[in-house]
Image (spheres, grey):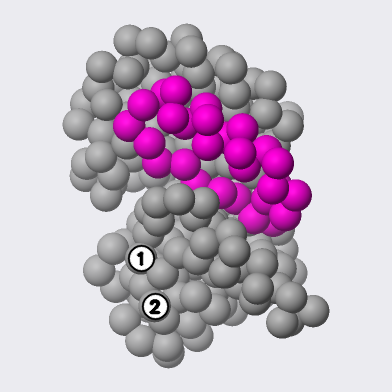
Amino acid sequence: MLCAVIAKSKISDIIDVAKKIEKIKGVNAIEFRLDYLNASEFKNFDKFFEIEKIKKIKIATCMLKNEGGNFKGSIDERNEILKKSENFCDYLTIEMKNFRDVFNSNLILSYHNFEKCPEKNEIEKILDEMEKIKTKIKETKRDVNIIKKIAVKFNSFDDNYKILPFLLEEKNFRNVIILGMGKYGKLSRILNYYFGFLTYVSVEEKTAEGQLSVEEFEKILKILE
């Protein structure tokens, strides 16, 4: 499915864009990049409950500075924001290296590498570590859905061959997001639409190098069909 990303500095702007996205039939989900919000906006976080009316899958993300995001607060402060987001979002995305099991909602466990694509054996270790975390969560919260996400920088087209075998494995079908950032990663973004849990597209601002817009993606889908 297609997930449109919203990265705005004001809650009112986020809500306005979300209402526009709700009318786009081809988009099934919305990711809210809360780390783009101005710090002062978190005092008015209750205004966010208005997005509860949006009939799309809703994902909240608030990436720390050391995760490649914009949030300047501590891990505990970020976790408090995400815990509040559980009230109106279907999924929370949180980086594996800073994960703490303090959430009750569906989760997307993520790993980012903004410099390179790891080798196959490293990717396998990352997925295995995510699986261990997933198992521990499932032992206490059996009704939650947990998706594994790997987003890494592709420096050549050959990097596709390092990650795509994992995306195409039957056990991972619709349960992972494995994509490449950068111009060489566009193929992986398309394949995630067909084999992964979702793929990210932009409506206004692009939040990752190589990210396709909704219009670009729709043109590609028409060609493939």
Q: How many marks?
A: 2
The answer to whether marks 1 and 2 mark residues whose Cβ atoms lie closer than 8 Å is: yes
Residue at coordinates 27% horizontally, 49% vertically from top-left? 68
Task: Give the side of residue 208 with respect to residue 32, left or right.
Answer: left
Residue corresponding to mark 1: 209
Between 190 and 115, the residue placed more toward the observer is 190
The residue wearing badge 2 is: 183
Residue 133, image x, y percentages: 51, 42
Disc 1 element: loop
Q: Which residues are magenta?
A: 1-28
Question: Residue at position x 55%, y 21% from top?
Answer: 86
Q: Quadrant of the C terminus?
A: bottom right
Is any atom of residue 136 visible in this view? no
Left or right of 153, for residue 17: right
Q: Relative to 33, is 186 above or below?
A: below
Quadrant where the N terminus lies? bottom right
Q: Is residue 97 visible?
A: yes
On whether residue 34 falls in the magenta region, the answer is: no
Farthest residue toward the right?
225
In the depicted structure, whether residue 210 falls above or below residue 50: below
Instruction: Please check the rendered image and state whether residue 18 is part of the magenta-colored stretch, yes or no.
Output: yes
